[in-house]
């Protein structure tokens, strides 16, 4: 559900990306950031229990300094990172309640595109979209939200229930849109990534999205939805680099 897929890594690093890499190298030595004032608080709705999710073949991944900074900005200092064995799960996805999984190809992305991708997944976790899904699936199934403590049990409601998936698809689309703009701003504030170098460069090569009940809109649509945040990203990136 929380996946960004497609967009194979591109060879070569452009000059502008080198400048951003140097900027990122600088920010590695900066003091840990406080939680971002613009980042919405963690929702206070019901929190389910999320046991360790299966991630076959996944291995623990040492986070880059920029990812740790984004996690701190989002109020998640204990976030875990893993690398997947292959590309089957897409380039990145979030596992409830505290893990970001990246694919081997994602790790080869240019630094600001990768920062955006990681930022996007961090937002899913910080905003507890998995709990929001569990509540929505329960309620749309005619159950009270508290019918179970187990997040996995609530998520199983959707198995084989395409009608239910359609009912909650608007929620998934909203979550993806929020993860896009907040993820782009996290990448801007944590490492000076402009919208152009991060999210827009990522989407320009990405042809995934769309489809019935798909959570992700087309890349073109996602780029358009990010335009209102361009100036904010520019300001945050400017502050990070000066
Ligand atoms: Zn997502």
Image (cartoon, rainbow, N blue to C red):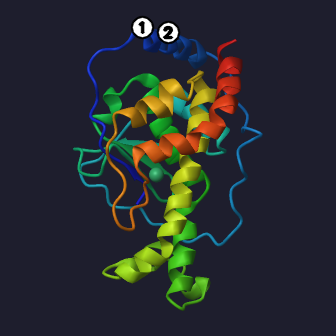
- Kindly indicate whether the residue at mark 2 contacts the one at mark 1 (C-beta within 8 angstroms): yes
Q: Residue 129 shows which numbered tag? A: none
Q: Position of residue 43 (x, y in %)?
A: 69, 61
Q: Residue at position x 33%, y 61% from top? A: 211
Task: Locate residue 32 relative to residue 52 in the image: left or right.
Answer: right
Q: Quadrant of the N terminus?
A: bottom left
Q: Position of residue 73 (x, y in %)?
A: 66, 37
Task: Locate residue 207 relative to residue 18 in the image: left or right.
Answer: left
The residue tagged 1 is 15
Asked whether residue 19 is in view, the answer is yes
Image-quadrant location for residue 235 = top right
Frontmost of labels 1 and 2 is 1
Q: Quadrant of the C terminus?
A: top right
Q: Is mark 2 within 8 Å of ligand 1?
A: no
Residue lying at the far bottom in this picture: please name it: 142
Image-quadrant location for residue 76 = top right
- Looking at the image, which is closer to me, 190 or 51? 190
């Amino acid at each position: 559900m929380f996946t960004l897929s497609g967009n194979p890594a591109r060879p070569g690093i452009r000059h502008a990306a080198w400048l951003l890499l140097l900027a990122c190298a600088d920010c590695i030595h900066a003091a840990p950031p406080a939680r971002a004032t613009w980042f919405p608080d963690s929702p206070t709705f019901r929190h389910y229990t999320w046991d360790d999710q299966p991630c076959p073949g996944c291995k623990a991944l040492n986070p880059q300094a920029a990812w740790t900074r984004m996690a701190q900005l989002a109020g998640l200092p204990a976030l875990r990172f893993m690398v997947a064995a292959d590309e089957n799960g897409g380039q990145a996805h979030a596992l409830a309640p505290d893990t970001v999984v990246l694919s081997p190809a994602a790790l080869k992305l240019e630094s600001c595109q990768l920062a955006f991708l990681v930022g996007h997944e961090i937002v899913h976790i910080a905003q507890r979209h998995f709990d929001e899904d569990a509540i929505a699936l329960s309620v749309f199934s005619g159950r009270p939200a508290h019918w179970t403590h187990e997040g996995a049990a609530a998520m199983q409601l959707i198995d084989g229930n395409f009608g239910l998936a359609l009912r909650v698809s608007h929620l998934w689309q909203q979550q993806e849109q929020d993860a896009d703009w907040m993820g782009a701003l996290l990448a801007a504030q944590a490492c000076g990534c402009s919208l152009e170098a991060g999210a827009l460069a990522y989407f320009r090569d990405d042809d995934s999205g769309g489809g019935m009940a798909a959570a992700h809109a087309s890349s073109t649509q996602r780029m358009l939805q990010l335009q209102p945040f361009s100036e904010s990203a520019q300001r945050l990136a400017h502050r990070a680099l000066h």
